[in-house]
Amino acid sequence: MFTHLSKRLGYYALLLVLAVVVSYALTSLALSPRGYFEGRQPPPPPGAVEAQLTALGINDHTPLPERFFAWLGHALHGDLGRTIDSGAVTEEFGRRIGVSLRLLLAGTLLGTVAGVLLGAWSAVRQYRFSDRAVTLFAFLLLSTPAFLLAVLLKTGAIAVNQAAGGEIIAFTGEHTPGLTGGFGTLLGDRLVHLLLPTLAIALGAAASYSRYQRGTMLDVLGSDFLRTARAKGLRKRSAVLRHGLRTALVPMSTFFAYGFLALFTGAAFTEKVFGWHGMGSWFIDAVGKGDVNSVVAVNVFAAVMVLLSGFLADVLHAALDPRVRTR
């Protein structure tokens, strides 16, 4: 098992290098930081634009390989360059990564657990009313774009607050500005602000995972080894949980990992709707400005998270499937 995971880790390291190269190349070719400066009113002198682009390391008149290796040399020493507004990308990255991780980890964990349980429950109760209700609810969520789901939740919170005559559900920003009090008060305030953004991500994840889990679970429920377990006297619930669900989770482990990128994409819109200043909202703003260094930083973060999720999926796969451990 250790040898298998070591090989996979080396494979992911190579993929990360490739992701960095491709991300920098595509970002540099797609974005136009020159247009951001030249579009200002009044227009700055051409010489000033050239000097600013050169200072930021994003001058499109400089050959792309030269720009990349200059950026890479600084990045290996912890310097991700300067933003288009001359701020430090590393400082902005450090400030925003905690915001996104709080939102993504909570939403991902909640959505994954709920999706697995709902999918397994639907499979066991195939074609009953509960199965059809879960299926309908999942398809409604899957057909709703992430930004629209966030807006609907926000609209519902506004209606609840108006009906209650006060702010019961806070939904703008990470916390209430200027709030004072003890640790419990501040923690409770952050949890209230975390509620709706987390729910927006978790609902989409649960809908997607429940459909896949239901399909894999149905395949397992008709398998010979499960019927053998029942024939040996094992109760249905024990057979399904101990043997059926564990086996059905094996193909799902890969889907958990690479579904993270879709969650990150949805989180970008969720952060924007709810006023969270995380990696997603930073990415949207940076693309609008043509901020090459900031976009590359966010892309590298997304690549690291996806590949880390892939490695954790390999660990989960090895834990669930003894054939992986014995190879």
Image (cartoon, rainbow, N blue to C red):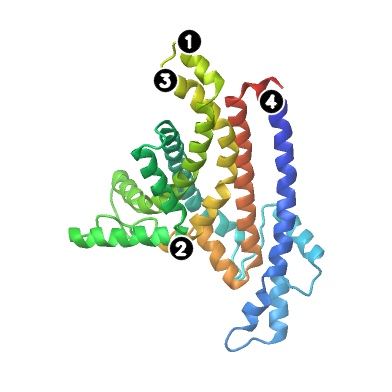
Label 4 amino acid? Phe
- Which residue has dot 2 on it? 272
Between 4 and 173, the one nearer to me in the picture: 4
Indicate the secondary structure of the residue bearing disc 1: loop
Between 87 and 115, the one nearer to me in the picture: 115
Q: Residue furthest top?
A: 232
Indicate the secondary structure of the residue bearing disc 2: helix
**Mark 3 or mark 2, which has the lower sequence index?**
3
Q: What residue lies at 71% left-to-right and 71% top-to-bottom?
A: 55
Q: CA distance from mark 4 to mark 3?
A: 35 Å
Label 2 amino acid? Lys
- Which residue has dot 1 on it? 232
**Mark 4 or mark 3, which has the lower sequence index?**
4
**Label 4 neighbourhood size at 10 Å, few (<14), some (14-19), many (20+)?**
few
The image shows residue 196 at horizontal and vertical percentages of 36, 53
Whether residue 240 is visible here, answered yes or no, is: yes
- Which residue has dot 4 on it? 2
Q: What residue lies at 68% left-to-right and 30% top-to-bottom?
A: 5
Label 3 amino acid? Lys
